[in-house]
Amino acid sequence: MAKIIDGKQFAADLRGKMTTQIASLKEQHNIVPGLAVVLVGEDPASQVYVRNKGKQAKECGINSIEHKLDESTDEAFLLNLIDEMNQDPAINGILVQLPLPKHIDSDKVLNAIDPAKDVDGFHPINVGLLSTGGKGMIPCTPLGSLMMLQDYHGDLTGMNAVVVGRSNIVGKPMFNLLLQQSCTVTVAHSRTKNIEEVVREADIVVAAVGVPELVKGSWIKPGATVIDVGINRIETDEGKTKLVGDVEFESAVEVAGAITPVPGGVGPMTIACLLYNTMVAACRHNNVDMPEA
Ligand code: NAD
């Protein structure tokens, strides 16, 4: 039976450490990290995410600024707002909640964010810095996944890792992060042949596919560590709904050495890493070292 990696607890511990670090930043340097979150429209899921981000930011001592804009907001207005925030020294992180309404070009908006304030790590400059080993901003979900892997294993050097999924926000940055840690990394995707055999070679499996319970226990090498990034809402036989990952937990937990559950695994780490990136950005902007926790 696998050890369950408790992402909720891990995220709470990380936020606890950050609260101490952010208090030191204020005490020693009079710095209060600022995070601006922009929400356009009324998407209910996005509203919940933005509310949670703001609440957790404040709890850690981050100054959280929310811009809730009408669905009809035009691109020029949004670009102008981003420009103002890029210039504002009190703002260290800028996050534009996706999806944006169809009349707005998301790439244009995301690319307008100052890369040093791009706490989501989606700007092409940060993508390039990650793949060349530079000092950029790392996307939150892969960063949270890596933190849990390092906490569990320590050094990852030489391990065989398989990332299932090649998206820009999870699969590709996860590949780069694991490669930086000197893993031997394979990226599997929807066109991969014999995917079960590919996954069975892995000491570390990261599933970011968006297909409910795709990865079965029979695909997992006994003792492997499984990080399930997927968040899928499915209907149960009783006509209710529940959240499941991209891994079939019931069968995988019998074979793996360690596994993240859904919910309560990678999900809570994503917001914690957004706050972490905001703190990192504030230190860099002010040219100070990150305080000890
Ligand atoms: P995406 O749709 O952008 O990419 C999915 C990838 O999976 C694609 O590269 C595709 O090639 C691959 N894929 C699709 N079907 C496949 C199959 N049958 N076999 C093998 N590969 C297949 O998705 P994404 O944005 O990377 O998200 C993936 C999952 O992670 C989703 O469930 C999403 O909700 C979740 N997610 C969770 C968090 C979090 O905070 N925990 C953050 C982002 C995404």
Image: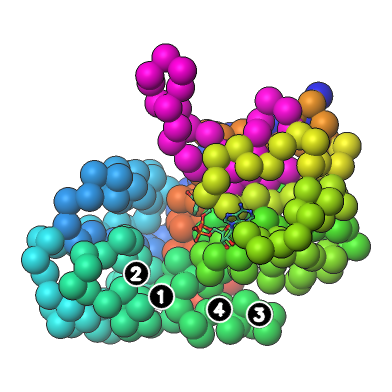
Tell me how far mark 3 sits from mark 1, CA to CA: 19 Å
The verdict on label 2 being within 8 Å of ligand 1 is: no
For label 4, the crowd category at 10 Å Cα-Cα, with few meaning under 14, some 14 to 19 and many 20 or more, is many
Q: What residue type is labelled 3?
A: Ser
- The disc at residue 94 is 2
Tell me how far mark 4 sits from mark 2, CA to CA: 16 Å
**On the image, numbered disc 3 is attached to which residue?**
131
Tell me how far mark 3 sits from mark 4, CA to CA: 6 Å
| 172 versus 113 height, above or below | above
- The disc at residue 117 is 1
Q: Residue at x 31, y 82 (%)?
A: 108
Looking at the image, residue 226 sits to the left or right of residue 277; the answer is: right
Quadrant of the rendered image containing residue 10: top right
Q: What residue type is labelled 4?
A: Val
- The disc at residue 127 is 4
Tell me how far mark 2 sits from mark 3, CA to CA: 22 Å
User: Element type at marker 1?
Assistant: helix
